[in-house]
Image (cartoon, helix red, strand yellow):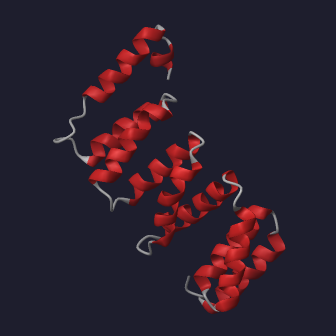
């Protein structure tokens, strides 16, 4: 941000244009868009980075890192409603535990920002009652209780989860 913030106001746009100018819609790879988005974010230019994150996800929809970066960027801009589908997609996938966990944590953050935690809490409690031995639902509800500050309840759910799926 140092070099961008040192520029006169009218030149900041020029610096952003230079960064964006290294990209070509048809020939640049998803990684190129993601890298330039990361550079812009490092200078605090989240709004300018967002369309580049979106393009990286569009070009490589299977890349979970790009999806997470895009969702986090949207959250930094207080755009939880737009971030939520990205977080839900990450939470639903089962190929990578780290990104699944980040998706679930992001969902909780987005639900909090959208004032939906209570609604989701009740929904997830009902889902767990219907299937009390579902270790994925147990862990998800445990994270919900963690988020709500009820550590004893979260620990109890995590312990049940460990009993059901000791290898997870």
Query: What percent of the width, then of the height, locates residue 29?
Result: 23, 46
Q: Residue furthest left?
A: 27
Lateral position of residue 117 relative to residue 83, left or right: right
Q: Is residue 89 above or below residue 127?
A: above
Q: Is residue 134 left or right of residue 48?
A: right
**Left or right position of 111 against 20:** right
* Residue at 66% in and 81% down: 138
- Judge from the rendering whether residue 56 lies leftward or rightward of residue 111; answer left or right: left
> Which residue is rendered at x = 33% and y = 22% of the image?
17
Quarter placement of the C terminus: bottom right
- Residue drawn 49% across and 51% down? 71
Which residue corresponds to the image point at 66% horizontal and 53% vertical from the top-left?
A: 114
In this view, 134 is above or below 84: below
- Tag count: 0
Residue 5 x %, y %: 51, 16
Quarter-of-image position of residue 65: bottom left
Residue 82 appears in the picture as rendered: yes
């Amino acid at each position: 941000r140092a070099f961008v913030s040192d520029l006169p106001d009218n030149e900041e746009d020029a610096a952003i244009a230079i960064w964006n100018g290294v990209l070509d819609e048809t020939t640049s790879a998803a990684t190129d868009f993601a890298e330039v988005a990361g550079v812009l974010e490092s200078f605090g230019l989240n709004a300018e980075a967002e369309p580049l994150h979106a393009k990286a996800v569009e070009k490589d929809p299977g890349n979970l890192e790009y999806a997470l970066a895009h969702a986090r960027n949207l959250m930094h801009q207080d755009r939880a409603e737009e971030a939520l589908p990205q977080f839900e997609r990450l939470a639903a996938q089962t190929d990578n535990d780290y990104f699944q966990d980040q998706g679930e944590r992001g969902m909780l953050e987005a639900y909090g920002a959208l004032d939906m935690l209570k609604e989701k809490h009740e929904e997830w409690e009902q889902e767990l009652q219907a299937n009390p031995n579902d270790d994925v639902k147990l862990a998800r509800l445990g994270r919900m209780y963690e988020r709500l500050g009820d550590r004893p309840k979260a620990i109890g759910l995590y312990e049940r989860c460990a009993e059901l799926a000791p290898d997870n």
